[in-house]
């Protein structure tokens, strides 16, 4: 069942792989595992973020083994084929002696990649399992653009300035359960009075409302009582993120991002701001908070930032900015 879900659901959706703040400079990269494929997400010399299959076009060798780093070029450890940050093959020892060999035909195979509000998404819909050494033409099928995918959310979160925020803390939870149960649990607060009594005092469990109920998304919010916040103390301790026009109304609303319904509700990556799907075994998954404390570090008083770093502020749903 899980293998079928990977094939029919996750391999056709836009999946979250990181935030642009993780690779701020040219040559910075992260390596992510997505539906059994290893991907290199890297910033090139022009500042563009690109994604490539982590496979050399020569003999299929893994190019990068580390989870993140910085490089001036991508070089295969096997035969030293070397690729530029834009994926072009720029060096192949002795291959100039091979009749008809053209470096331009052996660039790294790119993955569909796009950025939304600073978050980096990839889509493997045009590539079957383990086909990353095939040509782009052999894998090409039509993919709905990320811009079209997120059209229902156009401008909805722009005032939060998420693109300029930076990670302050990361916590991972290895949940030994079917991923659908995890997201079903997050989709309701019926259990909150008994399981999360302190949360219920801050954010009434029956206060949820949906902002989005059509298209590929289902999303809404829960209210927060005046003067309260989702911190360890339960009290507001920092200014709001970005510029919120109706500040009084915002004080009573906590964003509860439950993204996707019906056709794509089985894609956990849509809960993009809290968790990221990594893929487990035997129907089990690892759910990872995707740097939930995204902080504009320069805009946060040092004392507050130190509290975030030390973990004394709850990692979930806590955003800071001037």
Image: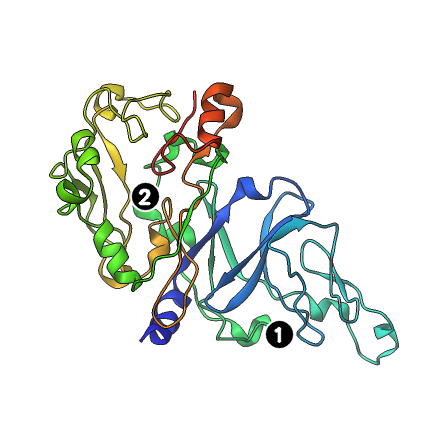
| Rendered-image quadrant of the N terminus | bottom left
Q: Position of residue 133 (x, y in %)?
A: 62, 74
In the displayed structure, would residue 20 be above or below residue 262?
above
How would you rate the neighbour count of disc 1 (Cα within 10 Å): few for under 14, some for 14-19, many for 20 or more? some
The image shows a total of numbered marks equal to: 2
Question: Can the viewer see residue 43 in this picture?
Answer: no
Q: Position of residue 94 (x, y in %)?
A: 87, 73
How crowded pointer 2 is (Cα within 10 Å; few <14, some 14-19, many 20+) is rated as some
Q: Residue furthest bottom?
A: 99
Residue for point 16% across, 30% down: 201
Which quarter of the rendered picture does the C terminus lie within?
A: top left
Question: What residue do we see at 61% from left, 39% from top?
Answer: 24
Precedes in sequence: disc 2 or disc 1: 1
The disc at residue 133 is 1
- The image quadrant of residue 61 is bottom right
Cβ–Cβ under 8 Å for marks 2 and 1: no
**Front-most of 5 and 91?**
5
Residue at (41% x, 67% y) in the render: 11
Mark identifier at residue 153: 2
Task: Name the side, left or right, on which 205 lies relative to 160.
Answer: left
Q: Which labelled disc corresponds to residue 107?
A: none
* Secondary structure state at the residue bearing disc 1: loop
- Relative to 113, does residue 304 appear above or below in the rendering? above
Secondary structure state at the residue bearing disc 2: helix
Percent of width and height locating residue 35: 45, 67
Q: Closer to the observer: label 2 or label 1?
A: 1
Q: Out of 129 and 314, give the one closest to the viewer.
A: 314
Question: Can see residue 71?
Answer: yes
Q: Nearer the viewer, residue 244 or 154?
A: 244
Q: CA distance from mark 2 to mark 1?
A: 35 Å
């Amino acid at each position: 069942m899980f293998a079928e879900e990977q094939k029919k659901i996750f391999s056709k959706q836009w999946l979250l792989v990181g935030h642009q703040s993780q690779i701020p400079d040219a040559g910075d990269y992260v390596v992510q595992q997505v539906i059994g494929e290893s991907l290199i997400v890297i910033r090139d010399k022009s500042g563009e973020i690109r994604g490539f299959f982590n496979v050399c076009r020569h003999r299929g060798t893994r190019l990068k083994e580390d989870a993140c780093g910085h490089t001036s070029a991508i070089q295969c450890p096997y035969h030293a084929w070397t690729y530029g940050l834009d994926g072009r093959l720029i060096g192949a020892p002795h291959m100039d002696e091979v009749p008809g060999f053209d470096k331009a035909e052996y660039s790294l195979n790119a993955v569909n990649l796009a950025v939304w509000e600073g978050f980096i998404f990839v889509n493997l819909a045009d590539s079957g399992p383990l086909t990353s050494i095939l040509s782009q033409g052999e894998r090409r099928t039509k993919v709905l653009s990320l811009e079209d995918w997120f059209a229902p959310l156009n401008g909805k979160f722009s005032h939060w300035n998420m693109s300029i925020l930076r990670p302050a803390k990361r916590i991972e939870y290895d949940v030994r359960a079917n991923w659908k149960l995890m997201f079903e649990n997050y989709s309701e607060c019926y259990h909150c009075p008994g399981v999360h009594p302190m949360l219920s005092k801050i954010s009434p469990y029956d206060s949820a409302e949906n902002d989005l109920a059509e298209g590929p998304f289902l999303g809404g919010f829960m209210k927060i009582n005046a003067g309260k916040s989702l911190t360890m103390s339960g009290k507001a301790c920092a200014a709001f993120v970005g510029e919120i026009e109706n500040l009084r109304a915002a004080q009573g609303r906590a964003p509860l991002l439950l993204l996707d319904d019906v056709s794509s509700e089985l894609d956990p990556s849509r809960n993009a701001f809290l968790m990221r799907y990594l893929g487990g075994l035997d129907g089990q998954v690892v759910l990872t908070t995707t740097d939930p404390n995204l902080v504009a570090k320069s805009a946060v008083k040092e004392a507050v930032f130190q509290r975030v770093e030390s973990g004394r502020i709850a990692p979930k749903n806590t955003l800071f900015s001037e």
